[in-house]
Amino acid sequence: MAPLYQQIKQALRDEIDAGRFDPAEPFVTQREVCERFGVSSITAVRALNDLVAEGVLVRRRGVGTFVAPVRRRAARSGAIACIVNGLHGLRGAHLTNILAAAEDVCAGAGYQLVLQNSADSTEREEGAVRRALQYGVDGILLYPVQGRAHPEVFAEVRRRRVPLVMIDRYRPDVPTDAVVADNTDLGLQLTAQLIAAGHERIATLWGETECTSVTDRQAGHLQALRAAGLPIRPDLTALRPYEPLDEKGRLALLAGLLGTPEPPTVLLCANGYVLAMVAHDLGLLGLRVPDDVQLACMDDSGPYETLPLAGEAVLPSAELGRRATELLLERITGPAAPPQQLVLPVRLGERRTAGVR
């Protein structure tokens, strides 16, 4: 049987590994160890001193003893997992710029960025996170899929104290760090610009509908309509998934919108991919942009940047990647701290078409 101090040390270490102690709060004292385990102060001191020597606990002069961050208790792997939703090309330059900036920061700090694609699959995302934990990465950057799947895997990340930072969107049900664009302001500013150009009937067309980057943009869009005293028309403002529809469904949706007595004068597209599909589909319907209907885009218009757009937002893509990776490195090397959400400003691009004709 192991000596008594080793048994106590192991019991405390098991509880630490199970996440039962908050690294931001002082650890149990020598006296508390004595009372709990019924041992002498000599035995309690030896158990605690060993945990400090092994890097499991850290003493802060004048403050007390605390659970050390995981990265101080184990050799660092030098690897950061980057799990992204969209390597199949739907996010174009936005995702490319995020990844390039993240890689630059990692390289400068001596870390390897290990890229994994969740491909819009909650199962693949869960598997990627579990593999990252299994391989012992120092931290995780996550561009999450939409929805609220597998909360248990994020609980496991927290239990193991592996730093995780979400990029571009956040999970309201997961208390973790996130770096996002100000999507509410994006929706508000872009809609206000369209209204100022004379558009009073604006139809929104979306790709994903269950992620915060979208719901926040919709909230800003509605806020701008209310501020201008315009009616909220559910047929124009609904979270309408356009991208998943087949061609027949998309053409029917457009024909229905544009065939009403008071049709929209501009179609506000969620992203460059939706914009490309809408432009293509309008051509199939024999409609011309901007003569018959105008288009606007909530982020980079990608390969359709030559289209005459009524409005376009510019996302801080590279800044998202840079700030998220810097925050993750802070979590890896610094003391434990409460999660935070960094919100980066957006700007509008130049209009490439006149107002309502």
Image (cartoon, rainbow, N blue to C red):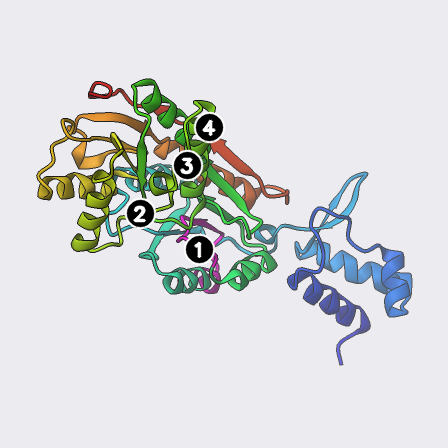
Q: Looking at the image, is mark 4 or mark 2 earlier in the sequence?
A: 2
Secondary element under disc 2, as helix, strand or loop, is loop
Instruction: Find out whether residue 189 is within the magenta segment.
Output: no
Disc number lying in front (1 or 3): 3
Q: On the image, numbered disc 2 is attached to which residue?
A: 207
Answer whether residue 168 is visible to the viewer in this image: no
Residue at the extreme front: 261
Q: Looking at the image, is mark 4 or mark 3 earlier in the sequence?
A: 3
Q: Nearer the viewer, residue 278 or 87?
A: 278
Q: Looking at the image, is mark 1 or mark 3 earlier in the sequence?
A: 1
Q: Please name the residue shown 21% across and 35% down the image.
A: 302
- Give the Cα distance between marks 4 and 1: 28 Å
Q: Which residues are magenta?
A: 132-148
Secondary element under disc 1, as helix, strand or loop, is loop
- Amino acid type, callout 2: Gly
Q: On the image, numbered disc 3 is attached to which residue?
A: 217
Q: Looking at the image, is mark 1 or mark 2 earlier in the sequence?
A: 1
Disc number lying in front (4 or 3): 4
x and y percentages locating residue 161 in the rendered image: 59, 55
x and y percentages locating residue 157 in the rendered image: 54, 58
Quarter holding the N terminus is bottom right
Callout 1 environment at 10 Å: few (<14), some (14 to 19), or many (20+)? few
- Above/below status of 142 relative to 151: above
Q: Please name the residue shown 8% across and 39% down the image.
A: 286
Q: Is residue 106 left or right of residue 7?
A: left
Q: Is residue 305 left or right of residue 225?
A: left
Q: Is residue 199 left or right of residue 186?
A: left
Q: On the image, numbered disc 4 is attached to which residue?
A: 226
- Give the Cα distance between marks 3 and 2: 13 Å
